[in-house]
Amino acid sequence: MAGYASFVNTAVGKKLAAQLGLPRPVRLRRYAVDAPLVDGAVLVGGHGGTPLLDRVRAVLADEAVTAVGEVAEGQRVSAVVADLTAVESPEDLESLRALVGPALRSLAPSGRVVVLGRPPREAATPAQAAARRALEGVTRSIGKELRAGATANLVLVSDGADSGVDSTLRFLLSGRSAYVDAQVVEVTGGEAAAPADWRRPLDGKVAVVTGAARGIGAAIADVLARDGATLVCVDVPAAGEALARTANRVGGTALQLDVTVPDAGERILEHARARHGGLDIVVHNAGITRDRLLANTDEQRWASVVEVNLLSVLRMNEALLADGGLRDGGRVVVVSSMSGIAGNRGQSNYAASKAGLIGLVQALRDDQGLRRRRITVNAVAPGFIETEMTSRIPFATREVGRLMNSLSQGGLPVDVAETIAWLAQDASAGVNGNVVRVCGQSLLGA
Ligand code: NAD
C-alpha cells in the first residue's frame, strides 16, 4: 500500500482516521494458488425455486467449502450468495433484503456478496423487468455500504445459461476478484467446459500480451503463465530489455514489435505459429496517454493516442480474428479504462480511444462468424491502478484517484490480470461482450 493507505494503517494514522471519520483501506484478500476459495462458510439462499443454488452448492462442495442456509448467532460467513433468478415482481425483492441485510453484519473481512439474477431484457412482464433491474441498484448500494475489503457483484444469467456460470462464481468468490466491485457480469451462454484443474485453467493455451514489458502487461503475462498458458510477450523495441525479463520470467517468448505497424497482427500470428504452434488468447494491453485539456490538444497528441490505443487494435483484430487466425474457442480481451466510461478531465483523446474499445467489443458480441468459432471478446476497464503510468500523476490528484472508490485504495496490476485470466478461460465461454471494471467501485462518475 502506498501514501495515505500505508499511513492510515500505522498506530497514529489509525487513531487519527477514527477520530476524523476518514476511510481506512485494508489489505485485500488476493488469490494464491493454494489458498482456499473463501475463508469460511458461505450463506446461500434466495427467492422461490432458486434453480442456480444447486450449482452454487456444487462449486462450494468441489472446493470443500461449507454452505449454510442461515447464520448462527456469533457466526462469521465468508460470503453470501443470493439467487434472485426467480423474482417475478418487486415484492419478491423482500427475499433479498431478508437474506442479505442481516448477514452483512456477519460478513468476514474481504467477504463477498454475489447476487444472481436474470437479464431484465429477457423478462416476461414489465414488473419482472423492474424487479430484475432493481437487483443492480441494490447490489451497487451494498458495494458502497460494505467495509473491510468486502465486495458486492451481480451476475445476470440468461435463461438456459445456468451451466455456464461456474467460472464466474469462482472468480467473484475468490481473491482473484479483489478489486472488482459493484459490477454486473452477464453470462449468456451455457456451453462451458470445466478445466481438468481449476488451478491451471489455461493449460495448453497460447496467449499474446501487448505492452508486456512492464506495469499491467507484465502482471498479465505472469498471471496467465501461472494459470498454465504459454506466453508471447510483445512490446516496442525500445523496451526490449524489460520485455526479455518478462518473457524469461514466464518461460515464454519475446516479440519486439510496435503494435501500430500495419502488419502487427500478421507478425504476432506468424510468431505464435512458428514458436508455439498457434494462438488462443489475445490481450490488447499496450496503451499510452498524452494528457492535455482538449483546448490544448494538438493534432499529434490526439492522433498518437487514438493510433496506439484503438486503431492498432482494430487493425490487428482483422488478422487475428480472420479465418485461420485465432484457434476456435479463442479469447480476446481489450484493456479499456474508467476514463472511457466516465470521461476524465484532460484525457479526451485517451477517453475517446478507450470508449472506442468498448464499442468494438459490443459490436463483436453479435458477430455470427465469431460465435460459430466460439470466440469471445470482452473488455476490462481498470480504475486507479498503481503503475508507472499513475505514479506520474501529481500528488494531490493521485491521492484522490487512490481513495475515491469503495475500497479506499488503488488496485494492483495483478487485479487487472486476474480479471483477464478469468475471461480467458474455456469455462468463461458464456461471458461475451462484457465490460468489467476493475476499479474498486470508483466513485468518479458513471
Ligand atoms: P505502462 O505505461 O506502465 O505500460 C504500457 C506498456 O505498453 C509499456 O511497456 C509500453 O512500452 C507499451 N507500449 C506502448 N506503446 C506501444 C506500442 N505502440 N507497441 C507496443 N507496446 C507499446 O502502462 P500501464 O499502467 O501498465 O497500462 C497498461 C494498460 O492499462 C494501458 O492500455 C492503459 O491505458 C490501461 N490502463 C491503466 C490504468 C492505470 O491506472 N495504470 C488505468 C486504466 C487503464
Image (tube, rainbow, N blue to C red):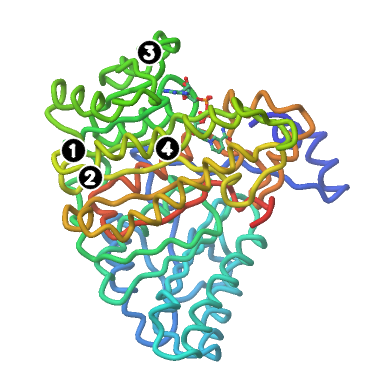
**What amino acid is found at the position of numbered circle 3 in the picture?**
Arg
For disc 2, the marked residue is: 330
Q: Amino acid at mark 4?
A: Ala
Residue 410 drawn above or below residue 298: below
Residue 229 appears left or right of 432: left
**What crowding class fits label 3: few (fewer than 14 Cα within 10 Å), some (14-19), or many (20 or more)?**
some
Question: Any mark on residue 325, and which?
Answer: 1
Query: Above or below — where is 315 with respect to 112?
Result: above
Q: Is residue 201 left or right of residue 109?
A: left
The answer to which quarter of the image holds residue 229 is top left
* Disc 4 secondary structure class: helix
Q: Earlier in the sequence, mark 4 or mark 1?
A: 1
Q: CA distance from mark 3 to mark 4?
A: 18 Å
Distance between the alpha carbons at the discs numbered 1 and 2: 9 Å
Provide the secondary structure element on which disc 1 rests.
loop
Cβ–Cβ under 8 Å for marks 1 and 2: yes
Disc on the earlier residue, 3 or 1: 3
Query: Where is residue 122 drawn, in percent x and y?
Result: 38, 80
Label 1 CB sits under 8 Å from any ligand 1 atom: no
Q: Do residues under tags 3 and 1 come within 8 Å of each other at their CB atoms? A: no
**Local SS, label 2:** loop
Q: Residues within 10 Å of mark 4 (few under 14, many from 20)?
A: many
Q: Earlier in the sequence, mark 3 or mark 4?
A: 3
Q: Locate residue 52: give its quadrant.
A: bottom left
Q: Residue furthest front?
A: 299
Image height check: is 407 above or below 315? Answer: below
Given this view, does label 3 or label 1 mark the residue nearer the observer? 1
Pointer 4: what residue?
417
Whether residue 45 is visible, yes or no, is no
Q: In the image shown, does 326 or 24 lie closer to the viewer? A: 326
